Structure formats: structure tokens, C-alpha cells
Image: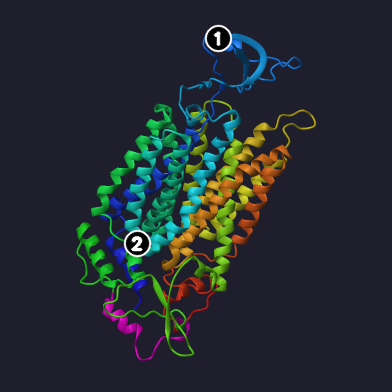
């Protein structure tokens, strides 16, 4: 029995361009990629700083009266908006004090943000920066448990529950009446955004045969790019942050009626030993596509699978450590049986992300991908923060910075599918991004002869942004193809959470510019270069069936096809 091959062939038979794939593919791209992307990147507009702000004057006085212009020695020492001349008993004095009557804000485009609503300026400015950290903390904390829940309860239910709670958190954010309620809702948005994207992405990838997985992952990346480009237009049209948040939070609820159409991942059903449910799901998809289905897609029922697993010859040697056994009538769970060779007893252990580190090859692959995700996130956010100083219209700048990602994702798909494969795409793009960062750091503003080199600096910075976006285009497709089904979502959650550590570290690394302007981009560049070099040690996964068991994951890179896909007796030790 080779359920992996049976399933891949069944998915090919059902047709990538079938009605079911078009409907579900579009649903997942829109509601588990586009909306979560917009609900994350809206942060740029929610916490944007005003052009200027001043202490609000008391009644009977104007800004010209109360704004300090000198402390007696240096002009404009107090024009930062945090101080004013004190008014005592209706008389204006020359004593300087902090703002006593609130603030007045000047926004170029008439927008509203939490900075002006909650007065997050002057001695409260740290709270504005904390809001960003809270969001990233939610993304970080939510990644691993959401991945585990997705593996435990299924991709479909976690996708729709996450969408529902993400919408509720977004509505709560829009109606937050104080800063502390705002950050609580912001944290929950981070948690449930992770659940939506992790569960939705894994569900999408697992419904595709190997040769279509790169297209699926690239479609998610391009959807992210189009979403943030569209967000720039929406933010320009809807300049009240509460209204913009409500549009996104209510809009995502359109996903819920699709519950009746979207099916559970057949691969996940197989990992749960629910072979009959998997067969019924394939039959439903065939009926939805209006095509004639064979009497049986998968060449084994639950009873037949159990008979093969408990045959009198017992498991082969490579299978012994990860053999599976289910009693009839027992509800399948995400468990594998481990054989105790001393007494023949079996101890059932639930798979977690810790199992990724119990075998040497799988642990190596996991550690390298952890560094890749950390470097990709840190460099992406680091370059974005450095590019934020571009002069001009805020909305146009955001649009252009987002636009550069789309061709990167397109090129990533082309190279993954038709040229270098997953490994080469991820490795080279990290190297390009890292080298571009180092060049950007070391190019002087002017030459010794006075030639302006700012255009060269900008060019290399954009090459770095293109390269790191290219990396994301490859790594999100590459990662789930390396890990077995039983821990795929948990691994994705672990790596996604780790990437948030990189995102949280990026602003602090950028602040090292105060110590030396060479430090930030050199740090980003060196980390990306090291990660890119180590990526060459990973296995290639293009057109290779997804690994189903931990043994499959351990053998990735050692054999041409994971052992559960080929006849293990042959055990072809063909190095990639």
C-alpha cells in the first residue's frame, strides 16, 4: 500500500483546474492570505506619526503665545511640541512646563491614528513603539500553539475558527476606547492571524500534487503583495483608522459560508488513519467537479490498512521505530506507536515540534530553516525600516515599497519550477539580499571628489528588498515540503514564530545606527549570507512527494523518494 502515491495520483485525476480547486483556491488566497496581510500591515497607518504636534493652549491663548522659542540661551530648544509656556492665574509666564491641556496635531492628509487619539507622544511615545511589539509578540506566541492545534484538530476547523476570532478581534480593536484595550485586541489579532495563515496555507498546499505546490505557495506570496498594494489604496481612501479596520474585519466574514464547500485536508485525514473519510472526501470533490470517479481512489480502506500494518511478518527494520497500529473502533489521533524492543510493548506518543530534533538529519534541516526564517524576517523588516525615510507621499511610498515584492514572488516561482528548484532559489536569494545589504552599508554618500552616490545606495537597498522578498517567495513553499505531515503545521508554526523574533529584533538593530552607521545593514547582511550558505545543505524537494512519517522526514535528502513512497525493500540510496 502506498497511500501517498495514491493520493497524488487522485489529485492529478481530479484536475488542478477543476471547479473545486478554483473555488477553494480562491477562497484560501483571499481569506487566509490577503485579508490577514492587510490586517497586519495596516499597522503602518494606525500608528503613523503626525507631521507635527504642539501643546494645546489654554482658553484665551493661541499656539503662538504658548509655544516656547528659547530657554534664554538657544533658540528652538522647546519646539518639539512637548513643552509650553506656563499660564498662572490667567497670566502667561516665561516658565516652561509640560503640556497641561492635551495636544494639537497636524496631519498632512487629514488621517486619524492612535497617536493622536491616545496622545502617544512625548513621555508616552514609548507606548506607540510598544504597540508594534505587542503585535509581533502575538504573532510569535500564536505561531506554535496554532500549528499544534492545526495538526491535532484538522486544517479546516482551525482555518474557519481563526478567521472568526480574527474578525472579532479586529472589530474589538476598531471600538477600543483606550490604549490598554487596544493593545489587548492587537495582541489577539496577532495570535489569530497566525492561526488563519498557518492553517489556510497548509490546507492549500496539501490539496495539491507535488508538481503544483510551488504554484500554490507562490500564489500565496503574490496575494500578500497584491493585498498590501491594495491596502495603500484603501488607506488613502479611508483615512480614519477605525473605519479602515472595520472594513477589513467585517469583510473577512464573507469566508464563513464557504464552510459547506471546503473539505478537510485528505493528507491530514490519512495522517489520522481516517482512510475511509479520506476516500469519501475525494469522492465529494469528484462529484463537485462533475467528473466520473473511480470506485476507489485510495487502494486501501481502514481495515485493509490495519491488516497490512499488523501482518504476521511484522514491520521491516526501518519501519520498526515508527510503526503504526490502530485498533478497530478506536478514534484515530495524531499519534505514532514506538516499539520497545525489550518487552515488545508499545508506548504511544503524541507528535510535537520536539520530534523534529530527535533524529540527526531532520534536526539539521530544522535548524537551518530556523536560521533562514530568522534571517528572512529580520532582513525584510530591517530594510523596510531603512526605506521608510524616503521623501514624498506616505501612501505612494508604501505603494512602491509593496510593489517591488510582486515581481520578486513571480521570479521566485519561475526559478523554483523551471530552473534551480527550491533549495537554489532560497539560498541564492538570501545571498543576494545579504550582499546587497553589505554594499549598501559601505557605499559612502559621496566620493572623495564630491560625486553624489545616494542613487547607488538606494539601488542596492532596493536590490536587497527584492532579494529578501524573493527569499520569502521560496521559503514558504520550501518549508512545508521538508517536514512530515504529522508535524508539518507545528513546524510551520515554530518557524513562523521564530521569524517574529527577527521582526522584533530588527528595530533595535536599526537603532545601532546611533553607534555606527555601518552596523545595522552589515548585521542584516552577514546573517543573510550565513543563512544562504547553510541552505545548500538542505535537500531539494521539487517534484518529490510530501513526507508523511517521521521516517520520511529523516530520509529527506538521503534518498530520491521518501521511503513511504517507494518500495522500501529497494531503499535506493541516491544522494540529491
Q: Position of residue 24 (x, y in %)?
A: 30, 52
Q: Nearer the viewer, residue 216 or 305?
A: 305
Q: Earlier in the sequence, mark 2 or mark 1?
A: 1
Location of residue 13 with respect to 184 vertically, above or below: below
| Figure quadrant of residue 280 | bottom left
Between marks 2 and 1 in the image, the one whose residue lies nearer the viewer: 1
Q: Position of residue 483 (x, y in %)?
A: 47, 65
As helix, strand or loop, the secondary structure at mark 1 comes to loop
| Figure quadrant of residue 365 | bottom right
Q: Residue furthest front?
A: 89
State the separation of the CA atoms marked 2 and 1. Answer: 64 Å
Indicate the quadrant containing the C terminus: top left, top right, bottom left or bottom right.
bottom right
Location of residue 517 with respect to 545 vertically, above or below: above
Q: Is residue 79 visible to the viewer in this orientation of the structure?
A: no
Q: Nearer the viewer, residue 284 or 502?
A: 502
Residue 478 left/right relative to 310: right
Residue 13 belongs to the span the image colors magenta: no
| Residue identified by numbered label 1 | 61
Q: Position of residue 481 (x, y in %)?
A: 46, 63
Disc 2 packing (10 Å; few <14; some 14–19; many ≥20): many
Q: Which mark is residue 154?
A: 2
Count of numbered marks: 2
As helix, strand or loop, the secondary structure at mark 2 comes to loop
Residue 315 belongs to the span the image colors magenta: yes
Residue in the picture at 47% in, 33% down? 46
Residue 547 left/right relative to 516: left
Q: Position of residue 164 (x, y in %)?
A: 33, 48
Residue in the picture at 54% in, 17% down? 56
Q: Which residues are magenta?
A: 299-319
Q: Is residue 152 visible to the viewer in this orientation of the structure?
A: yes
Residue in the picture at 35% in, 50% down? 28
Indicate the quadrant containing the N terminus: top left, top right, bottom left or bottom right.
bottom left
Amino acid at each position: 500500500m502506498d497511500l501517498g502515491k495514491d493520493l497524488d495520483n487522485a489529485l492529478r485525476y481530479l484536475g488542478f483546474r477543476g471547479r473545486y480547486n478554483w473555488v477553494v483556491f480562491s477562497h484560501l488566497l483571499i481569506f487566509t492570505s490577503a485579508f490577514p496581510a492587510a490586517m497586519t500591515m495596516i499597522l503602518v497607518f494606525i500608528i503613523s506619526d503626525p507631521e507635527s504636534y504642539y501643546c494645546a493652549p489654554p482658553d484665551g491663548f493661541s499656539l503662538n503665545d504658548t509655544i516656547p522659542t528659547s530657554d534664554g540661551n538657544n533658540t528652538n530648544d522647546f519646539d518639539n511640541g512637548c513643552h509650553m509656556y506656563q499660564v498662572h492665574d490667567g497670566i502667561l509666564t516665561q516658565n516652561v512646563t509640560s503640556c497641561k491641556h492635551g495636544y494639537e496635531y497636524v496631519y498632512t492628509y487629514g488621517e486619524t491614528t492612535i497617536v493622536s487619539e491616545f496622545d502617544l507622544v512625548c513621555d508616552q511615545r514609548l507606548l506607540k513603539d510598544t504597540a508594534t511589539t505587542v503585535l509581533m509578540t502575538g504573532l510569535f506566541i500564536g505561531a506554535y500553539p496554532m500549528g499544534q492545534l492545526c495538526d491535532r484538530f484538522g486544517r479546516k476547523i482551525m482555518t474557519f475558527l481563526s478567521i472568526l476570532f480574527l474578525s472579532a478581534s479586529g472589530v474589538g480593536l476598531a471600538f477600543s476606547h483606550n490604549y490598554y484595550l487596544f493593545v489587548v485586541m492587537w495582541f489577539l489579532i496577532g495570535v489569530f492571524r497566525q492561526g488563519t495563515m498557518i492553517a489556510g496555507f497548509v490546507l492549500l498546499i496539501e490539496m495539491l500534487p507535488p508538481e503544483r505546490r510551488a504554484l500554490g505557495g507562490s500564489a500565496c506570496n503574490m496575494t500578500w503583495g497584491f493585498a498590501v498594494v491594495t491596502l495603500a489604496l484603501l488607506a488613502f481612501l479611508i483615512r480614519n483608522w477605525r473605519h479602515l479596520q472595520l472594513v477589513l474585519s467585517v469583510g473577512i466574514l464573507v469566508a464563513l459560508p464557504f464552510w459547506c464547500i471546503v473539505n478537510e485536508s485528505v493528507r491530514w485525514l490519512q495522517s489520522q488513519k481516517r482512510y475511509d473519510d479520506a476516500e469519501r472526501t475525494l469522492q465529494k470533490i469528484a462529484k463537485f467537479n462533475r467528473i466520473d470517479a473511480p470506485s476507489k481512489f485510495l487502494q486501501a480502506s481502514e481495515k485493509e490498512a490495519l491488516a497490512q500494518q499488523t501482518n504476521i511478518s511484522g514491520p521491516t527494520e526501518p519501519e520498526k521505530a515508527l510503526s503504526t497500529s490502530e485498533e478497530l473502533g478506536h478514534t484515530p489521533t495524531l499519534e505514532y506507536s514506538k516499539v520497545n524492543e525489550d518487552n515488545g510493548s508499545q508506548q504511544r506518543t503524541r507528535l510535537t515540534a520536539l520530534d523534529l530534533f530527535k533524529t540527526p538529519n531532520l534536526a539539521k534541516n530544522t535548524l537551518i530553516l530556523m536560521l533562514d526564517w530568522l534571517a528572512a524576517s529580520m532582513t525584510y523588516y530591517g530594510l523596510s525600516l531603512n526605506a521608510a525615510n524616503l521623501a514624498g507621499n506616505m501612501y505612494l511610498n508604501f505603494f512602491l515599497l509593496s510593489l517591488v515584492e510582486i515581481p520578486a514572488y513571480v521570479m521566485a516561482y519561475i526559478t523554483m519550477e523551471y530552473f534551480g528548484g527550491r533549495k537554489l532559489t532560497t539560498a541564492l536569494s538570501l545571498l543576494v539580499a545579504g550582499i546587497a545589504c553589505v554594499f549598501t552599508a559601505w557605499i559612502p554618500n559621496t566620493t572623495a571628489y564630491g560625486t553624489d552616490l545616494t542613487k547607488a545606495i538606494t539601488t542596492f537597498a532596493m536590490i536587497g528588498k527584492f532579494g529578501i522578498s524573493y527569499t520569502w517567495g521560496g521559503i514558504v513553499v520550501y518549508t512545508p515540503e521538508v517536514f512530515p505531515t504529522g508535524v508539518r503545521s507545528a513546524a510551520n508554526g515554530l518557524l513562523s514564530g521564530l521569524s517574529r523574533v527577527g521582526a522584533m529584533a530588527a528595530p533595535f538593530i536599526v537603532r545601532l545606527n546611533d553607534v555606527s552607521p555601518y552596523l545595522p545593514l552589515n548585521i542584516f547582511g552577514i546573517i543573510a549570507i550565513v543563512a544562504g550558505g547553510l541552505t545548500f545543505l538542505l535537500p531539494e524537494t521539487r517534484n518529490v512527494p510530501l513526507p508523511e512519517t517521521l521516517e520520511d522526514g529523516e530520509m529527506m535528502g538521503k534518498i530520491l523518494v521518501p521511503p513511504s513512497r517507494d518500495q522500501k525493500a529497494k531503499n535506493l540510496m541516491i544522494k540529491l
